[in-house]
Amino acid sequence: MSQKGSNLRTQEFAAAVICMFENVGAQDPAKRVLQEKATAYCNQIKVSADGWKLCMQALIEHAAGRIEIKFWCLDTLRDHIKSKYESSSDLDKSALRGAIFSFLKECCKSIVQPTGA
């Protein structure tokens, strides 16, 4: 998949996650249907063999963004680690560790600012 196609898929996924959370308990039938479709799409990504990779990419791209995206992606990565990490390739294990480290490093930048002289 091209970089542009990957970015588009990540943006589509992020929009679905936001839609899923924003429309919880919606009274409007159209919004309920939209929320149900977004939830089904996100759950499909979550259980797919490479869904963790999309979540990893979305997490990195949205590290400073919406909490809903971070929550869903971290939960998906947690599920992957608990159930599939041991059977993953060494390359995938390394990519996952690197992505989590990058995410934490990015998060810490906004929390801890070095004091200048």
Image (spheres, rainbow, N blue to C red):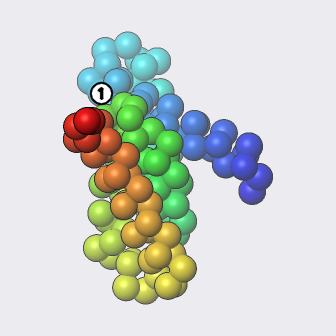
Q: Residue furthest top?
A: 28
- Residue at 66%, 39% (x, y): give it: 8
Question: Residue beneath label 1, please?
Answer: 24
Looking at the rendered image, the quarter that the N terminus falls into is bottom right
| Picture coordinates of residue 36, whole percent (x, y) | 42, 35
Relative to 43, does residue 49 appear above or below in the rendering? below
Tally of numbered discs: 1
Residue 73 visible in rendering: no
| Picture coordinates of residue 43, whole percent (x, y) | 42, 51
- Residue at 37%, 85% (x, y): give it: 86
- As rendered, which of 45 and 111 lies closer to the eye? 111
Residue 30 visible in rendering: yes
- As rendered, which of 20 and 59 lies closer to the eye? 59
- As rendered, which of 44 and 33 lies closer to the eye? 44
Assign a secondary structure to mark 1.
loop
| Picture coordinates of residue 65, whole percent (x, y) | 39, 32
- As rendered, which of 12 and 108 lies closer to the eye? 108
| Picture coordinates of residue 18, whole percent (x, y) | 41, 30
Looking at the rendered image, the quarter that the C terminus falls into is top left
Q: Amino acid at mark 1?
A: Val
* Mark 1 neighbour class, 10 Å CA radius: few under 14, some 14 to 19, many 20 or more: few
